[in-house]
């Protein structure tokens, strides 16, 4: 989804781990811009502005303008990014130039709405199986998310990816038979033995009988008098 947002970037000449580390100390992050048949460009950006986009409702599917100082201004998407696992600082980004007239592949989240009758009236469990689907569409037609109404789903019923309402210019790339959400019956707990539970398995009983028979034979041999020579 395209947003009226412009983020400024500075050309980056120095590369390597040491240069990237110095940038992060200054509160900046290294990034690379590529795509549209043009040469890649190394830049420096403000992580704070990028994090706002990543945490927005459209997330990494947001299309915004990247303005490079003394260089190009172009619509882009965030294709890849890396956060520090401990401090959660933004360590690196990849931007892709976007041509509004050309289709692209994106993954779109799927949300559910409503209360399933299978849960409310039949005691079932609503299980979300697929939380995002991949589509092929024009940049300006990327939906923020898909919504599935689960109100009429009973136990044993569900919604598959092929039932999602796509735009006129969109094509579903995810398997149409992939289950998005369904309602399943709760499994009954196995009864405890002695409280109406199943008897001990036959294989165990048989083993005990064989052990007892073997013990009896051993005792009989021990008790039998030794034969005279």
Image (cartoon, rainbow, N blue to C red):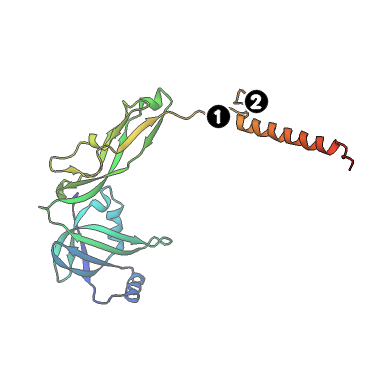
For image coordinates 20% across by 69% down, the residue present is 41
Residue occupying the far front of the picture: 229
Q: How many marks?
A: 2
Q: Does residue 62 lie above or below 91 as drawn?
A: above
Q: Is residue 123 left or right of residue 150?
A: right
Which residue position is annotated with label 2? 194
Nearer to the camera, 108 or 172: 172
Q: Is residue 65 left or right of residue 215?
A: left
- Coordinates of residue 147 in the picture (x, y in percent): 27, 37
For image coordinates 69% across by 31% down, the residue present is 209
Which residue position is annotated with label 1? 190
For image coordinates 81% across by 37% down, the residue present is 221
For image coordinates 18% across by 47% down, the residue present is 136
Secondary structure at badge 1 equals: loop
Q: Label 1: how many residues lie within 10 Å, few (<14), some (14-19) or many (20+)? A: few
Image quadrant of residue 210? Answer: top right
- Coordinates of residue 125 in the picture (x, y in percent): 41, 31
Nearer to the camera, 73 or 196: 196
Q: Label 2: how many residues lie within 10 Å, few (<14), some (14-19) or many (20+)? A: few
Q: Does residue 24 lie above or below 140 as drawn?
A: below
Nearer to the camera, 53 or 134: 134
Q: Is residue 7 left or right of residue 214?
A: left
> Is residue 201 visible from the viewing direction of this image?
no
Image quadrant of residue 23? Answer: bottom left
Nearer to the camera, 150 or 217: 217
- Coordinates of residue 124 in the picture (x, y in percent): 42, 28
Image quadrant of residue 5? Answer: bottom left
Disc 1 to disc 2, C-alpha distance: 12 Å
- Coordinates of residue 224 in the picture (x, y in percent): 85, 36
Q: Is residue 219 left or right of residue 195?
A: right
Would you say the residues marked 1 and 2 are in contact, meaning their CB atoms lie under 8 Å apart?
Answer: no
């Amino acid at each position: 989804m395209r947003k009226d947002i412009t983020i400024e970037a500075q050309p980056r000449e120095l590369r390597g781990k040491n240069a990237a580390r110095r940038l992060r100390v200054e509160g900046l992050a290294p990034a690379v811009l590529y795509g549209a048949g043009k040469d890649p460009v190394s830049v420096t950006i403000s992580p704070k502005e990028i994090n706002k986009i990543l945490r927005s409702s459209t997330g990494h599917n947001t299309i915004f303008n990247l303005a490079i100082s003394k260089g190009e201004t172009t619509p882009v998407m965030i294709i890849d990014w890396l956060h520090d696992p401990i401090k959660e600082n933004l360590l690196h980004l990849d931007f892709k130039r976007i041509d509004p007239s050309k289709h692209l592949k994106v993954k779109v989240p799927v949300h559910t709405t409503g209360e399933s009758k299978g849960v409310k009236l039949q005691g079932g469990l609503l299980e979300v199986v697929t939380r995002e689907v991949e589509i092929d569409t024009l940049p300006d037609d990327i939906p923020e998310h898909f919504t599935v109404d689960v109100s009429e789903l009973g136990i044993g019923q569900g919604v598959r990816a092929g039932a999602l309402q796509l735009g006129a210019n969109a094509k579903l790339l995810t398997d149409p038979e992939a289950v998005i959400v369904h309602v399943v019956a709760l499994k009954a707990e196995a009864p405890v033995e002695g409280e109406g539970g199943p008897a001990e398995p036959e294989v165990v009983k048989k083993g005990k009988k064989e052990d007892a028979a073997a013990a009896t034979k051993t005792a009989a041999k021990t008790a039998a008098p030794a034969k005279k020579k």
